[in-house]
């Protein structure tokens, strides 16, 4: 389902959980009344054996493709790196950079949320476990099961967070 | 001077010293005999007050513009982050990611060199000071003065390193 098929009073939000090996994404539609439904979710995977420029190109093209297909009103991205390791942070930064660029080049507004904010918005507490997040995503989007794999669920949670917390045209 | 104006036996190398506030670049031409000359150097600056997506878009468009203008045979980039701070590494990763992407999307081969390798290639020792690098860049490229500012000189050093160390068509 693409935006063109949805009634006008929907806004589409693309949520992204950045990573180098696996970038999770979730696309949700928010109705003017505030109800949110899932449009699509999944994972952009890159081979750990491929050179870094090839991997970030795949991530960039994956996100650019989602933006072109869904024409989102906004992109919502997890904004803080929790690790202490500078090398992992540098690597994650490469992926995050090309993800932000995909939106910036297409004039899509970017909302950034800390993992704690996403958990708080979706579950009600910043300390929620992965399982609790999955459960509440399932409840709020009226799904039969929580989205899998976990990276896709995190992308959906980022989108849902912005659908609940962001400002939208009436 | 762009590549089109140079004799065919030249190869153009674009060197980049990635940063978020200042990305240094140097463009050199390597003759088939091995002599290297400077074509252009400078710095892509972004405002620390601008939001990150705008800044990385400016870096991406700056590097993409250099690639389109000079049609380099290869891009040479500094490859290691020396800091221990994960937040600085994450930030640098954003810039580095969009720089690699600019080359990857245009099928420009990327060579990555550690700062020590660049110093070793240009000065002869991996422990060279900034001043020594500037002096040897000036000597090797037969310039009146070392390139300024330091970020531009580092971009030129990255290009010169690949001109001296890389493999090229005869």
Image (tube, coloured by chain):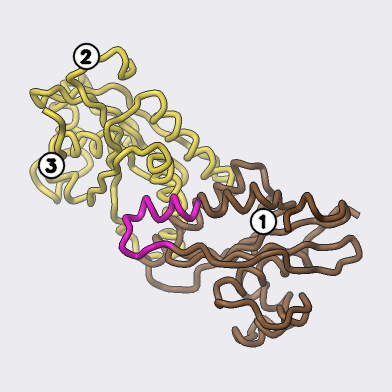
Chain colours: A yellow, B brown
Q: Residue at x 36, y 39 (%)?
A: A107
What main secondary structure does the magenta stretch of the protein show?
A: helix
Using the numbered discs, state the Cα–Cα distance from disc 2 to disc 3 in whole angstroms. Answer: 26 Å
Q: Which mark is residue A121?
A: 3
Q: Residue at x 29, y 43 (%)?
A: A110
Q: Position of residue B105 (x, y in %)?
A: 59, 41
Horizontal side, residue A122 vs residue A15: left or right: left
- The residue to which callout 2 is attached is A7
Task: Give the camera-side residue of B59 and B93.
Answer: B59
- The residue to which callout 1 is attached is B75
The quarter in which the C terminus of chain B is drawn is bottom right
Q: Residue at x 91, y 65 (%)?
A: B33
Q: Do labels 1 and 3 touch, CB within 8 Å? A: no
Q: Quadrant of residue A162?
A: top left
Q: Which mark is residue A5?
A: none
Task: Give the camera-side residue of B106 and A96.
Answer: B106
């Amino acid at each position: 389902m693409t935006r063109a098929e949805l009634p006008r009073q929907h806004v589409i939000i693309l949520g992204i959980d950045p990573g180098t090996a696996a970038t999770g994404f979730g696309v949700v539609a928010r109705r003017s009344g505030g109800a949110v439904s899932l449009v699509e979710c999944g994972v952009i995977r890159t081979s750990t054996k491929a050179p870094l420029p090839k991997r970030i190109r795949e991530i960039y093209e994956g996100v650019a493709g989602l933006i072109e297909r869904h024409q989102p009103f906004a992109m919502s991205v997890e904004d803080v790196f929790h690790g202490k390791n500078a090398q992992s942070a540098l690597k994650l930064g490469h992926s995050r950079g090309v993800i932000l660029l995909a939106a910036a080049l297409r004039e899509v507004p970017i909302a950034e949320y800390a993992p704690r904010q996403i958990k708080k918005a979706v579950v009600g507490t910043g300390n929620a476990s992965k399982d609790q997040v999955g459960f509440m995503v399932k409840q709020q989007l009226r799904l039969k099961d929580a989205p899998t794999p976990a990276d896709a669920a995190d992308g959906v949670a980022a989108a849902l967070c912005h659908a609940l917390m962001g400002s939208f045209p009436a």
